[in-house]
């Protein structure tokens, strides 16, 4: 099943799908050459929006937390990709230490942790869970709704290594996005592989760096396909030193919003798009759908309500938000049972391992869907097929649509690898 596009403006995207399918050998070779030069993030999830006239990633997560939403049919792909990733990093690996978020009451998140353990155990590793929560001082069982349980254990640090009691891992996998800072226990580990690296966490990572890298990738890819990079690239701007509490920095927000909306309007005019453009203002350092608002007119930023200011000023873990990114809004015209939907594509190493639709009946086509009311529908990707069907009519084939989403998600993953290289504090600098 392909969720239907409720728009007459699906021409450019059907053309893009056609072009992507026709260029498949060149595209796959292009990716192959990129991965010869750059290291993919260990795992990635990408939120993609399909406007019918534009298809673009709007968020790239380097600590994905929704593996439980992938269907069972997708597991063999995930296991194969996990094997390839581990083999590359530590071929003799026997033990994997998985460090999750502290969300021990969120059963959906815990189901994600359970699924990750299953993937890496099936890939041939002993997997145990170490907790960054100081209140976990001995092995602690947490019951899951399906009757099973996870055991969280306290971390043990000895010089350059991190492990658990009687458990010395070769590799440490973080499923914690470090929004609230980098814990001391994770710093200066010299003898083990820490994945993803610490600078991939939101303590230091910025979305504006990612979209700067993505812009470069989109231009390269668009040149390969002979198309306008705007069709796959959301324009953006950034503001630092915004204080939502006292209103300082509002001028920066309004000026940038006006400039960005002007650029989008010009593109809409060029393509004959009748929609009203909008932008999304969000925390430059953080995920989880927090601190996000839709702006249709720069004047909206003049009189923000106290409630909106409070919402925008606080990130995950109560962290204050002072850096924001303004991103061209990409409307989503896909529907699952008449509810607004967007595809989320999951990757391990350089491989697409599956995906699902984030569906939210309480939100509009121009709003953030990662919000209360969201649920997940792995419908379109149920056949776990990445292989496109030659000759199928654009817009009508699930494999073709999924392949196209996989291409866009992989472009975001290449951008993430560029971003991590550019922000690596340990990178050698050549004069």
Image (tube, rainbow, N blue to C red):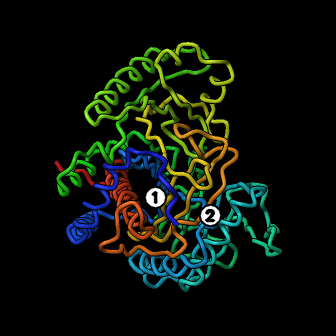
**In the image, which disc is placed on residue 197?**
1
Q: Is residue 272 above or below residue 344?
A: above
Give the residue displayed 63% in from the left and 32% down from the top: 314
* Along the line of sight, the residue nearer the viewer: 68 or 183: 68
Neighbor class of circle 2 (other Cα within 10 Å; few <14, some 14-19, many 20+) is many
Could you tell me which secondary element the residue under label 1 belongs to?
A: loop
Give the residue displayed 42% in from the left and 67% down from the top: 397
Check if mark 1's residue and mark 2's residue have beta carbons within 8 Å.
no
Location of residue 25 in the rendering, given as x and y in whole percent from the top left corner: 22, 72
Total marks placed: 2
Location of residue 72 in the rendering, given as x and y in whole percent from the top left corner: 61, 77
Could you tell me which secondary element the residue under label 2 belongs to?
A: strand
Q: Quadrant of residue 236?
A: top left
Give the residue displayed 44% in from the left and 26% down from the top: 240
> In the figure, is residue 152 to the left or right of 121?
right
Location of residue 289 in the rendering, given as x and y in whole percent from the top left corner: 59, 43
Q: Is residue 335 above or below residue 73?
A: above
Location of residue 213 in the rendering, given as x and y in whole percent from the top left corner: 31, 47
Q: Which residue is mark 2?
A: 99
Neighbor class of circle 1 (other Cα within 10 Å; few <14, some 14-19, many 20+) is some
> In the figure, is residue 27 to the left or right of 236?
left
Q: Is residue 197 above or below residue 249?
A: below
Q: CA distance from mark 1 to mark 2?
A: 13 Å
């Amino acid at each position: 099943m392909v969720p239907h596009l409720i728009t007459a403006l699906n021409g450019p995207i059907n053309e893009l799908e056609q072009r992507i399918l026709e260029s498949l050998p060149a595209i796959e070779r292009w990716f192959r050459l990129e991965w010869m030069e750059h290291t993919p993030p260990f795992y990635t999830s990408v939120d993609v929006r399909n406007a019918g006239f534009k298809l673009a990633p709007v968020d790239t997560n380097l600590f994905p937390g929704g593996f439980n939403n992938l269907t069972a049919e997708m597991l063999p792909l995930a296991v194969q990709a996990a094997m390839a990733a581990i083999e590359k990093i530590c071929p003799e690996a026997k033990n994997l230490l998985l460090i999750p978020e502290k969300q021990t009451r969120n059963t959906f998140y815990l189901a994600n942790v359970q699924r990750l353990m299953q993937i890496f155990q099936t890939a041939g590793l002993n997997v145990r869970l170490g907790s960054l929560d100081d209140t976990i001082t001995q092995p602690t069982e947490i019951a899951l709704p399906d009757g099973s349980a996870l055991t969280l254990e306290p971390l043990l640090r000895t010089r350059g290594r991190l492990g658990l009691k009687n458990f010395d891992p070769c590799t440490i996998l973080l499923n914690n996005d470090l929004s609230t800072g980098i814990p001391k226990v994770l710093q200066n580990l010299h003898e083990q592989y820490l994945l993803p690296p610490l600078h991939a966490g939101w303590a230091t990572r910025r979305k504006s760096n990612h979209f700067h890298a993505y812009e470069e990738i989109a231009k390269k890819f668009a040149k390969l396909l002979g198309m306008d990079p705007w069709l796959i690239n959301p324009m953006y701007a950034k503001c630092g030193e915004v204080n939502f509490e006292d209103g300082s920095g509002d001028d920066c927000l309004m000026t940038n919003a006006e400039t960005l909306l002007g650029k989008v309007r010009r593109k809409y005019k060029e393509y004959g798009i009748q929609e009203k453009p909008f932008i999304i203002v969000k925390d430059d350092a953080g995920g989880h759908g927090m601190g996000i608002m839709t702006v249709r007119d720069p004047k909206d930023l003049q009189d923000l309500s106290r409630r909106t200011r409070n919402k925008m000023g606080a990130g995950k873990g109560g962290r204050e938000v002072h850096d924001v990114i303004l991103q061209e809004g990409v409307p989503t015209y896909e529907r699952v049972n008449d509810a607004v939907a967007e595809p989320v594509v999951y990757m391990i190493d350089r491989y697409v391992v599956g995906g699902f639709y984030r569906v939210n009946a309480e939100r509009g086509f121009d709003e953030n869907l990662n919000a209360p009311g969201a649920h997940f529908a792995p419908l379109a990707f149920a056949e776990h097929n990445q292989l496109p069907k030659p000759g199928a009519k654009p817009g009508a084939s699930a494999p073709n649509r999924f392949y196209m989403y996989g291409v866009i998600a992989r472009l975001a993953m290449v951008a993430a690898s560029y971003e991590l290289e550019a922000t690596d504090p340990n990178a050698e600098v050549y004069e």
